[in-house]
Image (tube, grey):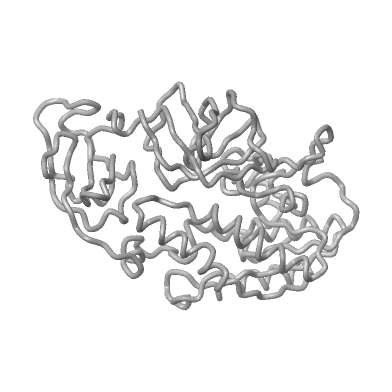
Amino acid sequence: MTSNTKLPKQRVVVGLSGGVDSAVTAHLLKQQGHEVVGIFMKNWEDDDDSEYCSSNIDFVDAAAVADVIGIEIEHVNFATDYKDRVFAEFLQEYQAGRTPNPDVLCNAEIKFKAFLDHAMRLGAEKIATGHYARVRRNESTGLFELLKGLDPSKDQSYFLHRLNQAQLSKTLFPVGELHKTEVRRIAEEIGLPNAKKKDSTGICFIGERPFREFLNRYISHAPGPILDDRGRNLGKHVGLSFYTLGQRQGLGIGGVKEKGAQRGGGAHEPWFVARKDLEKNTLRVVQGHDHPWLLSHHLVAQDVSWCAGHAPMPGVYAAKTRYRQQDAPCTLEAATEGFALRFPQAQWAVTPGQSAVLYDGEVCLGGGVIQVAAS
């Protein structure tokens, strides 16, 4: 049973963000005859009235949507939960030199934990969000499965891989059955005020502000040397937390050229962040997109979460090591802690702190946080 199969009429609490996906989600559920209640989640309070990120504007949009659809909306403040459960870990990971994915944490800790608990207190039988994913009950095993959204360019199962059986059993993803163009068309057809609203990008608490400027306020940083793969000093970094593997922009060494070709790139190839040495506070960079330091055939992940509640059997699957990536064939192996993946084709800029998410066809099995990658 996928999430658009006809369900008995239920009380469904929808997370209304002010965006078009959650708005159409609420409309579709109302159309199916469910009793729909909207919840607007406020997750961030610091400088919320700044030019970069204002939940007030989003709430006005969400309230206007609720008005058009004809449902009630409640404004709920989860800012303390967010700071304790998501933001604290986000900073801790950056301080440790890793690059976390706060959207994964936010879904696991806020949208499908704090929000789900709140919805159940309101008497909800299900919750729904505007994510592009699907839920299916496997008739042979009785387990709930997380599936990719039908629009491959919008699929968000990667961000939802930490959801467990209890959460999946209570969740609906109506727009996961649709392509984004169809969602926009429905929004215009029913006269939603946010039908043409741009999709939000990035994390709300960062918004459009310069990322480095934002992190600066929360993370201690010490400048140090930038060395290439031969150990030559090319300049100074501003603090290792501000760089991620594979980063090309903002290195401040664009003018440095090398005579003759090097491994993985020639004289005019761009520079990329390849390693971060925390002990020596040194940033290592290489020239050329396909430099060996940027390629990995093997990774180990910990802090593991499996949708079925247990690990899949070792064997051949597919995985993503970052959100915007094609599924890559891999072999799942057991590890002392967590799991290991081996890739027949080298993966580019596999980054500690990001999630390695495993798939069996359209089924998202779960995943873990990348600890280490190797060639």
Residue 278's x, y, as percent? 27, 50
x then y, percent, for residue 297: 41, 27
Direction from residue 190 to residue 353 in the image, left or right: left
Q: Which residue lies furthest to the front in this view?
A: 336
Q: Which residue is drawn at 72% across and 53% down?
A: 167
The residue shown at (80%, 57%) is 29
Q: In which quarter of the image is the N terminus?
A: top right
The vertical placement of 278 against 88, above or below, is: above
Residue 177 screen position, x and y as percent:
72, 43
Q: How many labels does the image show?
A: 0
Q: Can residue 192 be seen in this view?
A: no
Task: Give the quarter of the image for residue 90.
Answer: bottom left
In the displayed structure image, the side of residue 305 where residue 88 appears, left or right: left
Residue 16 seen in this snapshot: yes
**Left or right position of 5 against 168:** right
- Choose between 72 and 347: the one closer to the eye: 347
